[in-house]
Image: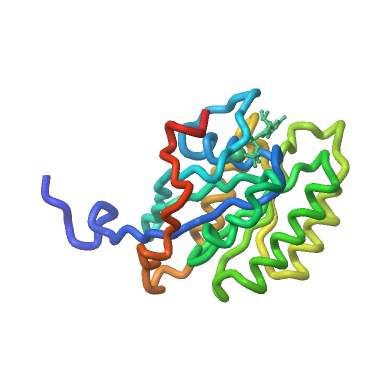
């Protein structure tokens, strides 16, 4: 069947590089695996270097394809991070609502992105493991106030029960400017690349 000009099928696909940053074990990989494959693993292996996955989001008026770099939060990989956030249009900075140190870590990632990331980078702060309410150690209001002060998005998510995971990516997709030039391919890191099958489950 022929597509009509202006129909969703004919709409241009907007490609955006998105990076996930945050301390180890906050659930970055689980969030991505939930978003891309709608799966969850209780025993997710720590990421080595970084993992690359893609996923498309359909908005009312645009199609957004995320090219996702899921970075490794272990300290020994920290120096690699600029390679992944360089040229990124969007960043999800993840903390674990049961771990206050991870919120401190998230704030330092936000600061680093604001100083050294793309000037127009869209930043979303994700308080993950929201299913563990009884073990909560970071109040929603505190993180939300911090996000508002810094002009960034904030959501609490659960990769485990899928709550707010798709919404997180949709909110970012809506916020991204659709008329901006597409990221240059050479901005993508060439080291430590891993295909999704190698490190994601
Ligand atoms: P690095 O790759 O080392 O940076 O860690 P990461 O941030 O990618 O964490 P990962 O996704 O590997 O998750 C760490 C652990 O937290 C895993 O055992 C998951 O099962 C668990 N986990 C992740 N998300 C959630 C969640 O939303 N709720 C609960 N209860 N556990 C979660
Ligand atoms: Mg990981």
Left or right of 189? Residue 161 is: right
Answer with the quadrant where ligand 2 appears in the image.
Answer: top right
For the N terminus, the quadrant is top left
Residue 47, position as x, y percentages in the image: 58, 38
In the rendered image, residue 119, in percent from the top left (x then y), is placed at: 57, 76
Task: Tell me: 42 left or right of 64.
Answer: right
Res. 192 in view: yes
Q: Residue at x 50, y 65 (%)?
A: 89
Residue 9 percent coordinates (x, y): 25, 52
Depth order, front residue of 99/150: 99
Position above or below: 128 against 82:
above
- Residue 156 appears in the picture as rendered: no
In the rendered image, the residue lying farthest to the top is 42
- Residue at the image position 52 percent from the left and 57 percent from the top: 84
Q: Position of residue 26 (x, y in %)?
A: 71, 40
Q: Is the image coloured rainbow, by chain, by secondary structure, or in one colour?
A: rainbow
Check the image and report above or below for 42 versus 112. above
Q: Nearer the viewer, residue 76 or 167?
A: 76
Q: Residue at x 68, y 44 (%)?
A: 74
16 w.r.t. 163: above or below = below
Q: How many marks?
A: 0
Residue 165 falls in which quadrant of the image? top right
Query: Residue 112 sits in which quadrant?
Result: bottom right
Task: Report the side of 190 relative to 10 (left or right).
Answer: right
Residue located 85% across and 56% down the image: 142
- In the image, 4 versus 113, the foreground residue is 113
The reply, left or right, for residue 134 in relation to residue 50 is: right
């Amino acid at each position: 069947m022929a597509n009509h000009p202006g129909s969703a099928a004919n709409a241009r696909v907007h490609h955006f590089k998105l990076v996930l940053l945050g301390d180890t074990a906050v659930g970055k990989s689980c969030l991505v695996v939930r978003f891309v494959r709608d799966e969850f693993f209780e025993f997710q292996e720590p990421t080595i270097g970084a993992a690359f996955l893609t996923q498309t989001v359909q908005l009312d008026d645009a199609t957004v394809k995320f090219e996702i770099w899921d970075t490794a939060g272990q300290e020994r990989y920290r120096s690699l991070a600029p390679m992944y956030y360089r040229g990124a249009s969007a960043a999800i900075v993840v903390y674990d609502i049961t771990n206050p140190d991870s919120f401190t870590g998230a704030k330092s990632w936000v600061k680093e992105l604001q100083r050294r990331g793309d000037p127009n980078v869209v930043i979303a702060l994700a308080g993950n493991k929201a299913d563990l309410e009884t073990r909560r150690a970071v109040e929603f209001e505190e993180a939300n106030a911090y996000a508002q002060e810094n002009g960034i998005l904030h959501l609490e998510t659960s990769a485990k029960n899928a709550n707010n995971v798709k919404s997180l990516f949709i909110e970012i997709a809506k916020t991204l400017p659709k008329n901006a030039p597409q990221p240059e391919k050479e901005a993508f890191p060439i080291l430590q690349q891993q295909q999704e099958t190698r490190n994601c489950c």
